[in-house]
Image: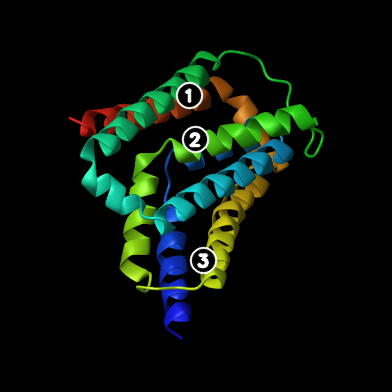
Amino acid sequence: MQEIAALAGVVGALAVGTVSPGPSFVMVARLAVATSRANGLGAAVGMGAGGVVFAVAALVGLQAVLLAVPSVYLALKVLGGLYLCYLGFRIFRAAKVSLAVEAAGQSDATSVSRSFWLGFTTQVSNPKTAIVYASVFAAFLPGTFSALFAAVLVSVVFVIETGWYAIVATMLSSNRPRRAYLDCKAWVDRAAGLVMVGLGLKLVASAR
């Protein structure tokens, strides 16, 4: 019963955090609208895999490490912020590049694989996500838990992260959002790029 209550608490807290807009949402949304549904779903799976990394790290004591060695957290902030700035710059720079949008489901395996890794690296580059996982797990996990509980928890984390971003990718890759994006691609890409750069700079500044 204690493990069920802990699982419910973790799931509820992480679900709220997952649906909150951030760099991961921006990345998946842009991929889904600008390329194809398959690419958006590939990125969604990458987000889920990144969530699994944080979940496993939190289970083995991520919060204890970050508290014991503050410089690790500061380094994560700087590196993660710089990576988000890099992604934002790439999006902004490509704003004027014409785009041949593929039909949903027509992406090749290579581009979907790239989308997966882009989603994964975007997820794991955000130290705030690491803190959320560490804090939520520390708040709700029982003092001792079984291997089955840990396996179920990690699986649920993957489902939450992947499921939400898959919904985002599916909704935004439909014809109407894609047509609207193509009509104003330059402005949308510039805005998305500036948002990513802004989030990255905010992370770097917070490491001071």
Q: Compute the Cα span from label 3 to label 1.
A: 33 Å
Vertical arrangement, residue 175 with respect to residue 166, above or below? above
Is residue 102 visible in the rendered image? The answer is: no
For disc 1, the neighbor class at 10 Å (few under 14, some 14 to 19, many from 20) is many
Q: Secondary structure at mark 3?
A: helix
Where residue 180 sits in the image (x, y, percent)?
Answer: 62, 33
**Which label number is shown at residue 164?**
none
Question: Residue shown at 64%/33% (left/top)?
Answer: 115
For disc 2, the neighbor class at 10 Å (few under 14, some 14 to 19, many from 20) is many
Q: Secondary structure at mark 2?
A: helix
Mark 1 residue type: Leu
Quadrant assignment, res 140: bottom left
Question: Sequence-wise, which precedes: disc 2 or disc 1?
Answer: 1
Where residue 125 sits in the image (x, y, percent)?
Answer: 43, 35
Q: Which residue is mark 1?
A: 87
Residue 14 falls left or right of residue 132: right
Where residue 205 sits in the image (x, y, percent)?
Answer: 23, 29
Question: Residue shown at 58%/47% (left/top)?
Answer: 49
Q: Secondary structure at mark 1?
A: helix
Question: Sequence-wise, which precedes: disc 2 or disc 3?
Answer: 2
Mark 2 residue type: Thr
Q: Which residue is mark 3?
A: 150
Instruction: Assess whether mark 1 and mark 3 are in contact (beta carbons under 8 angstroms).
Output: no
Q: Compute the Cα span from label 2 to label 1.
A: 9 Å
Q: Nearer the viewer, residue 148 or 75?
A: 148
Q: Nearer the viewer, residue 10 or 19?
A: 10
Vertical arrangement, residue 3 with respect to residue 74, above or below? below
Image quadrant for the C terminus?
Answer: top left
Q: Which residue is mark 2?
A: 122
Q: Nearer the viewer, residue 185 or 129?
A: 129
Question: Residue shown at 51%/18% (left/top)?
Answer: 90
